[in-house]
Image (cartoon, coloured by chain):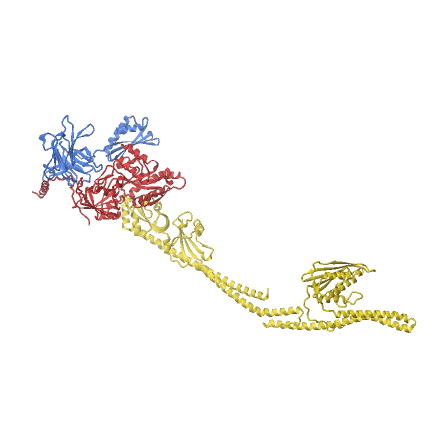
Amino acid sequence: MTFRAKLFFVFTLALLVSVGVIVAGVTINTRRAFDTLNAEHTNALLAQFQREFDRRKVEVVNRVHGVAEDQGTVTMAMNLARPGADVSVYVNDAREVAQAHQLDFLDFLGDDGSIISSYEWPARFGYKLAWVTQPQDWSSVGAFLTKVDTQDGPAIGLLSVTPIRVGDKNLYVVGGERLDKQFLSELVLPEGMRALLYLNLDSQFQAGDLVDVNGPVTQPDPFTATISDELARPTERSFTIPYTIEAGAAERFHALPLQGRDGELLGVLLVGNSQRDLVAIERHIAMLGAAVAGGGLLLGLLLSWWAAARVTRPVKKLADGAQRVSHGDLGSRVEVRGPAEMMQLANSFNRMTDQLNEQRERLVQAERVAAWRELARRLAHELKNPLFPLQTTVQNMQRAKEIDPSQFEEVFRESTGILLSEIDNLKKIISRFSDFARMPQPELAAVNLNDLARSTTKLFESQFSAVGRPPITSELHLNADLPAVQADSTLLRKALENLVLNAMDAMPAGGVLMLRTTAQDGGVHLEVSDTGTGLTPEECDRLFTPYYTTKQHGTGLGLAIVQSVVSDHGGRISVESEHGVGTSFHIFLPMKPPPRPPDHAPANGDGA
Amino acid sequence: MRDLAAEIAKLAPPPARINLLVNNISSLTPEQVSPIQSALRMQLANHGVRFGNGDAADTTVQVTLSEGIEGYVAVAQVKRDGAEQVAMVTVPRTVKSAPSTGGVLLDAKLVWQQPTEFLDFALPLAQPGEQTILAVLEPTRLVFYSQGLASWQFAREVDSDLAWVTRDWRGHIDLSQVAEQGPNAGDARWQKNECKGDFEHPNTVTCAVNERTGDAWIAGDMRPPFIPPGGGDAVSIALQCRSHSIALATGGGDWTEADFIQGYELLGGPGQAASASGNRINFLGPVMAIWPANAPGAARAVVHNLQTGNYEAYVVAATCSQ
Amino acid sequence: MSRRLAASSAIIAALAILAIPARPARRPHYGGTLRVEIGSTVNSLDPARAAANPADATVEREIESLIYEKQNADGSLAGVAGSGPFRISEWEPGKRLTLAANDDFPGGRPFVDSIEIDMGRSAHDRLVDLGLGRTDFSEIPAEDARQASGLGVRVSATQPDELIAIAFLPGHSAADDVRLREAVADSINRAAIVDFILQKEGEAAGGLLPQWSSGTAFLFPTTPDTVHAKELRSQIAGSSEIRLGYDSGDALEESIAERIAVDAHEAGITVATDAIAPGANAGRNDARLVRARMSSAKPGEALTSILSALDRAAGIDVAPLRNLDSAEQIYAAGRGALDGFHLVPVVWVPQVYGLSDRVRDWETPAAGESWPLADVWLDPGAATKN
């Protein structure tokens, strides 16, 4: 992930978290506020219901008293108090009286509780309502809820009883109002609230008995479980009905049980608060939050883009510069505009590269000097060897001339032979130095290392089994599918020959020389292993240093030449060795050498 | 009761021991029921039925004296071993008589009834060895019946032409005007028709049209002996009671109301005051006509029975109870 | 001569002059228009219908008996229209019918000159008009008789001659169980129906003949036996709901049906009442209330006509009754007809008429008889209202 992307992510995350926290906080507080408001509304509505209920009770009591005080009722009571009174005359009286006094229920009952006339069930004359005649001070009871049997089925009513006593007989006037949707329509409901009434007319929940102001509720099923619970355990409770998966369709209800005179559950008042407003506000908050978050995202995007631009561009420039430096371009500079820190960083980078450049220059210079010194030393060392015998030989010749002129001829002949040999040696040394100094640039062509390995091995076959030396066995483990690489076959051959010579030098007692080729990602791998004396770690470190040698003889340039060739091909060379076991040289060559960097070779390198 | 007792005995033969219960739901008075109950017991005993009360009885016989349109019905419900069998007999109804209170005691006897209207009837005094004749004056004819073994048998009818049709039929058989021509000589008049002859011998009766206008049947002194309360009709009967002449009078209702005949003692004096005397005989409909009967101390009355719709002929006999 | 003497002498003199002795009853007056109100609407008069159903006592029948010469023994009509005591002088079908006295009627001209019949008047309106003296004659629902009397209306009631009974309809599984039918019959409180609904104008019906006719009606129990009804109900598995139909235009039937439902409910039987439109099929009902009027006061004839009418109303074919000569035979036949409780008598209802004070010589018709409007007369001296 780029820095810009990270920066964008961080900005956005910070913004989203902030918005989320704010939205959640507002939502929670809003919900709490709604709950509080709903509770207040519910309580107000319940209080209103209770007031209306109480008012209705008083009204019912007054109306029934009105019936009892009606002249017709008094006359009826007086007539019925006479012995042998005929109650049948009054069988139809309740209807007219009930309508005149606006009562939904009205019964005239005789002294024994027998129905004389009934408005709500006219055919029920003669049957007894025993509960009316139970010892009771009806004037103190007032109005009460009770189940009423009517011609059309049971109903719930608010009833009052007024006895009229004439002599030792009572005429009971039982009247009241129906508790139904009409009652609900008297309540003033705030927006979003509604009232339902469940009339407990059956032992089990009956959907048709759940009514609102319009009559039976259209969706009664969601109430089944709660009302069934209420019927089993009457208590005030709150519950929510979701209706659908949409949260806004939910409704929160408060249930109030309505009980009769003996504590029996006759109905349940349900006050409902629609969650629609709350959900709407929550959605609004969420949408607002989303809008803010979206805007914030956009802002964040812009900010991050701008910030990144201000931050990452200089960093990228710095990174590019470092990249170039890593590739050797120590002259790379970074021009940055941005925050002071970035500019300071860029300046530091530039100073660093300048310093690196200077150091490299000095290093190169030092290396050059060192290399010259080393070359000089080596040259001196190499030259000193043959020069010493030259000097000795000339001195012998002088001595011989001086001491024994007769032997001078023989001494002259031997000495000139020695002198020519040493001069030849000198010439070889100089030639080798000259070769190293004049290491040519590779001329690339498709080269198959397997062929190279075979040809090189064949070249040294006679030396592997030379008379007078322990045999050396060669093993070739060549990858048949080895691809060809772009390389200079001459240089590679020379390098390989040097490695083979070094391997032979490392196995004075004979051994195994193994050559292996394998294909690798982007190139080929050549391994040259021997089972010779091996090298110590210190020797491995200095192995590729020019003129470093572990041999008693040799210029020490062989591995340097190998390294130079490998390096010129863009490859790598490494060594593994264990003293007393053997040594393996690993060369990796790319399929194609990379473009050659600017030549920093010593200007006078080939003039040795 | 004899027939009923026989039925009961069949249903609960000896050695059944019965618990006899009698219940009256008819219009019979307790005084009338009591002798019926006694008679039933006696008849049952004659059939060998044994009586018992409570647990001593294995059969309960509930006798109910009931009444329907065609008369009294005596129903016996014989309950034995959880099963019930019913027997019943029907007894024709007789005219009810209100309880007597002394004075003029009246007794009405139903002589004839028919579903169609008749205006008057007469029972000529039968001579020894001769059949009793009943003359019935209908709107369109005069019919004679002779007494058969069990009922009246048609003897002769004399048709007449209707001078006019009316809903207010009037007619009269008068056997008191020409007594010198025989004890049963008389005439029958209605509309313009007049029939004369010996009504005991129907063949001697001849009819002709009387051209006099008006109602031909009106003749003689038709004045009532007094004006009864309520505006009914009254006739004198040849009877003295407690030194007073006796008249019989009807009630004052219209043709839709039940009527009665009450005896009155004429107190004499201006205005012919009269005092109700004795029992009253109640009928099941209006008295359409009342005339003195041939026999002394009796009157004849035509009653329209509103329950059955029949027109009935009664002879109301009066006696004096001091 | 004292005033009293003068008065009595004057009376006697007047009678002598008139030579018309006082009749046992007051003498009819000719003239006037008899105002009649009926509840139904008559759109056509069809003697063929009368011939087909001679026992049907309908308003049409009553009117037809006024304009046709006579009624045959089988109840069918003889003669042509207008050959009776009255003839039609004006007729707005369904609204008003005016009959004029037929001077040439062989049985004698009616006392009134005409009869005006207003149709389609509700029971309430008829009662009000009777109370206000706006009409002379009208039928009154039996259950309103007491109220009418209380309003000062002159009321004439026949003996209870119309039976209201439950007929269980064949082919309905809900009523196939005889125990259920018997339980319904046992549960009915007939006395309460007579006292409260009929306001004591009627008689509890246990059998197919009223007590006043047969004298043996008391042998058919009328008191409810709710204990036995519950016992029978407990023997019946499953639902015991019965659908009881009644004529939707008959308030009395409706009240009786509702009461039967209440009584049955006490015995654990559910009776659902159902109003049936006039003339409609009671197809979905298990039973229905039916009315049947006696065609005669005589028990034998009455039983035959009652059974025939009940069975026709219930769609049942019944073999004609025979051997109805004695009270015992009549009782046995009636008892047999009620076996199985396919018919459950409920109450006997009288025909009740309201009359104005000026109507004279009104004879309450016996069972099977028509309104004797040809025999009544209007008293010009009667106190009139309005």
Q: Position of residue A405 (x, y in %)?
A: 92, 73
Regarding residue A538, the answer to whether it shows in the image is no
Residue at 80% across / 65% down in the picture? A552
Of the pair B2 and B116, the residue shown nearer to us: B116
Seen in the image, is A423 located left or right of residue C329? right
Palette colour of chain B:
blue
Image-quadrant location for residue B98: top left
Residue situated in front as seen by the camera: B257 or B244: B257
- The answer to whether A252 is drawn above or below residue B44 in the figure is below
Count numbered badges in the picture.
0
Extreme-left residue of the structure: C1
Q: Position of residue A544 (x, y in %)?
A: 74, 66
Q: Quadrant of residue B56?
A: top left
Q: Dividing the image into 4 quarters, which one contains the N terminus of chain B?
A: top left
Which of these two is toward me, A287 or B165?
A: B165
Q: Is there any visible trace of residue B95 in the rendered image? A: yes
Q: Position of residue B47 (x, y in %)?
A: 28, 26
User: For this view, does C53 lie left or right of residue C234?
Assistant: left
Q: Is residue B320 positioned above or below C377 on the image? A: above
Residue B154 percent coordinates (x, y)? 18, 30
> In this rendering, would A520 be left or right of A193?
right
Q: Is residue B293 above or below residue A354?
A: above
Give the letter of the red chain. Answer: C
Please identify the quadrant where the C terminus of chain B is shown.
top left
Chain (yellow)? A
